[in-house]
Image (spheres, grey):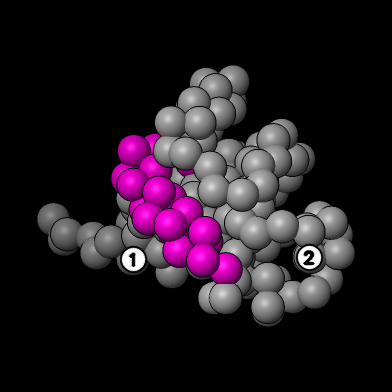
């Protein structure tokens, strides 16, 4: 029997998900972004809508010049490890798309928005503690039918 590579396994899983109309797993969604499980993914305008469209996704809107954003980044790295297989934790640099800044009416940084199946559930502005984010992500994941 031939061993499948991770890429082959992922391609087969994605094909099956597409054929049955099933949601992708968190690992599959991260792989599409070039991110590893347990790590914070980097979103771009081109990948934003697809990423938030299914499952639970916490997006951190940030910028280089934002001092609290650096501390938030450390919190998110820890959070990504904690919710590894259950939710996508991602960052979006606001300097790359004014369109999304307008769409979500971002005035302060960092701003974190928790999405579930494309719909915003909760918004936090300013530095937000890990325990707060963990609780809200776990609650959203708990109410998901499949992750």
Q: What is the magenta range? A: 66-87
Distance in Å between CA atoms under marks 1 and 2: 31 Å
Residue under circle 2? 100
The answer to which image quadrant residue 61 occupies is: bottom right
Which residue ends up furthest to the front in the rendered image?
67
Magenta span: chief secondary structure: helix
Q: Secondary structure at mark 2?
A: helix
The image shows residue 5, relative to residue 139, as above or below, that is: below
Number of numbered discs on residues: 2
Left or right: where does residue 2 sit relative to residue 12? Answer: left
Query: In this image, 90 relative to 40: left or right?
Result: right
Q: In this orientation, does residue 53 appear?
A: yes
Q: Which residue is pictured at 17% across the width and 59% down the height?
A: 3
Query: For the residue carrying disc 1, how many other residues have a C-alpha within 10 Å: few (<14), some (14-19), or many (20+)?
Result: few
Q: Describe the element under mark 1 as helix, strand or loop.
A: helix
Extreme residue toward the bottom, this view: 96
- Spot occupied by residue 104 in the image (x, y as percentages of width and height): 81, 55
Residue 80 on the magenta segment:
yes
Residue at 78% x, 65% y is 100
In the image, residue 141 lies at what x, y percent? 53, 28
Please tell me the numbered disc located at residue 132.
none
Label 2 neighbour load within 10 Å: few <14, some 14-19, many 20+: some
Mark 1 lies on residue? 7
Q: Is residue 86 magenta?
A: yes
Can the viewer see residue 29 in this picture?
A: no
The residue lying at 43 percent from left, 31 percent from top is: 131
Q: Residue 38: horizontal and vertical position, in percent?
A: 33, 50
Mark nearest the camera among 1 and 2 is 2
Mark closer to the chain start, 1 or 2: 1
Image quadrant where one finds the N terminus? bottom left
Looking at the picture, tell me which residue is in the foreground, 111 or 31: 111
Q: Is residue 44 left or right of residue 27?
A: right
């Amino acid at each position: 029997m031939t061993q499948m590579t991770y890429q082959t396994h992922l391609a087969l899983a994605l094909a099956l998900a597409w054929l049955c109309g099933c949601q992708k797993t968190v690992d599959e969604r991260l792989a599409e972004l070039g991110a590893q499980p347990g790590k914070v993914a980097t979103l771009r305008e081109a990948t934003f809508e697809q990423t938030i469209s299914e499952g639970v996704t916490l997006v951190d809107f940030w910028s280089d010049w934002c001092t609290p954003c650096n501390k938030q980044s450390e919190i998110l790295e820890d959070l990504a490890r904690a919710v590894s297989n259950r939710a996508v934790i991602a960052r979006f640099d606001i300097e790359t798309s004014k369109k999304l800044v307008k769409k979500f009416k971002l005035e302060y940084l960092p701003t974190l928005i928790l999405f579930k199946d494309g719909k915003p559930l909760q918004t936090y502005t300013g530095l937000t503690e890990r325990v707060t984010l963990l609780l809200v992500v776990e609650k959203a994941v708990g109410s998901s039918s499949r992750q």
